[in-house]
Amino acid sequence: MTQNKMAIGKKIEQLLSEKNMSQAELAEKAEVTRAAISQIIAGKRVPTLPVLRKLARVLSVSIDHLAGGSSKTDVEAVLKNDPKQIEFFRNFQSLDPQIQEMIKTQVEALKNKGTK
């Protein structure tokens, strides 16, 4: 059990580094306390499923990936035969959150326009 706690913590720490995000930013975006994030990363606490969901959403990975699975995202599994689309999603993940929201709003508007 302790090894699993450490694996989740190391994975989160790695993702924070890749995304140039602090523990405090993760805590704020995931609506979790800073202390909880610190304890999870240190392997002193196992995140609940709802917390794992929030962390995965903020870090743009699957819960399986956080828990030590090999799949980075569910999207990659679906799009594995289309490298251009995978690259698009990776680039999207690296954008500023405000720009991501603007793009999401535009996509939703286009989607709604197509259904009318």
Image (cartoon, rainbow, N blue to C red):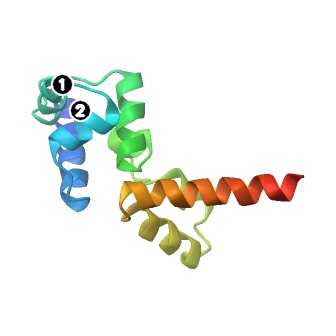
In the rendered structure, the answer to whether residue 69 lies left or right of residue 73 reads left
Q: Earlier in the sequence, mark 2 or mark 1?
A: 2
Checking the image for residue 3, the label placed there is none
Q: CA distance from mark 2 to mark 1?
A: 16 Å
Residue in the image at 57% along x and 67% along y: 80
Question: What residue would you read off at disc 2?
Answer: 4
Where residue 64 sits: x, y (%)?
A: 42, 41
Left-right relation of 73 to 80: left
Q: Mark 2 belongs to which amino acid?
A: Asn
Question: Residue at 32% of width from left, 38% of height from top?
Answer: 29
Crowd class of label 1 (few under 14; some 14 to 19; many from 20; radius 10 Å):
some
Name the residue at 18% across, 30% down: 40
Residue type at tag 1 = Ala
At label 2, counting other C-alpha atoms closer than 10 Å, the crowd grade (few under 14, some 14-19, many 20 or more) is few
Depth check, front residue: 34 or 101: 101
Residue at 55% across, 61% down: 103
- Toward the right, the furthest residue is 116
Up the image or down, 78 lies above or below 2; here it is below
For the residue labelled by badge 1, is the local secondary structure a helix, a strand or a loop?
Answer: helix
Q: Residue furthest bottom?
A: 84
Q: Which mark is residue 36?
A: 1
Locate the N terminus and report the quarter of the image it occupies.
Answer: top left
Helix, strand or loop at label 2? It is helix
Count all numbered tags in the image, as a single digit: 2
Position above or below: 91 against 22: below
Quarter occupied by residue 83 = bottom right
